[in-house]
Image (cartoon, rainbow, N blue to C red):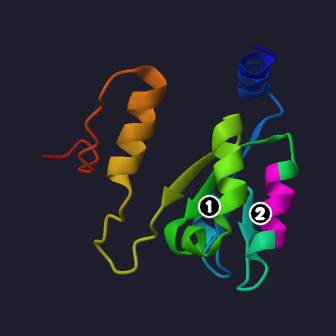
Amino acid sequence: MSAPTTTIAAAHDASASLRVLVRPGEGLGFRLAGVPVDEIAAGDEAARLRALLADPAVAVLVVESELLAALPQAPLRRAAQRGLPIVLPFTLPRRYGDAGAGRDYLAALIRRAIGYHIKLDGTGGRR
């Protein structure tokens, strides 16, 4: 019974942080926005993931989808069972005009968290 209390407290802890995981050379936009970025080279995935999952200050891991596919799945499943950190995949647009993927996953994550479906249309308020 204490696990949910710990998870809720950690999620609302001011020191809890967001980290973005990408391949080398793909983190500039996030850095410009002031977000901490971990650029993970091929072959370093398992060690870096273990370190980030063991860090109690990390509340959200935003992971590029191609990198996520290369990460070991067992530690990710354990993190999902604990509830923290939340792993949020995204796809970088590779060409001008690409919106990226992941809207369905993000909508499902929001619905699970708040119990209500939110439409993510990607128009940026334009119609």
Q: Which residues are magenta?
A: 47-53
Residue 21 in which image quadrant:
bottom right
Name the residue: 38% across, 30% down: 111
Q: Residue at x 25, y 36 (%)?
A: 119
Instruction: State the residue in front, 70 or 29.
Output: 70
Q: For the residue labelled by badge 1, is the local secondary structure a helix, a strand or a loop?
A: helix
Q: CA distance from mark 2 to mark 1?
A: 19 Å
Q: Is residue 50 magenta?
A: yes
- Seen in the picture, residue 76 relative to 41 is either above or below; the reply is above
Q: Which residue is mark 2?
A: 49
Residue 30, numbered label = 1
Residue 123 shown left or right of residue 50 in the figure: left
Q: Position of residue 14 (x, y in %)?
A: 80, 27
Left/right placement of residue 52 relative to residue 101 reads right
Name the residue: 66% across, 55% down.
76
Which quadrant holds residue 85?
top right
User: Three-letter amino acid code at disc 2?
Assistant: Leu
Q: Is residue 12 above or below residue 43?
A: above
Q: Position of residue 32 (x, y in %)?
A: 64, 61
Nearest to the eye among marks 2 and 1: give it: 2
Taking depth in this image into account, of 86 and 16 the one nearest to the observer is 86
One can see residue 35 in this view: no
Residue at (73%, 83%) from the top-left corner?
41
Q: Quadrant of the N terminus?
A: top right
Q: Is residue 108 visible?
A: yes
Q: Which mark is residue 114?
A: none
Q: Secondary structure at mark 2?
A: helix
Residue 27, image x, y percentages: 64, 70
Determine whether, in the image, residue 48 is placed left or right of residue 108.
Answer: right
Compared across the picture, whether 92 is left or right of 71 comes to: left
**Looking at numbered disc 1 in the image, what kind of residue is underneath it?**
Phe
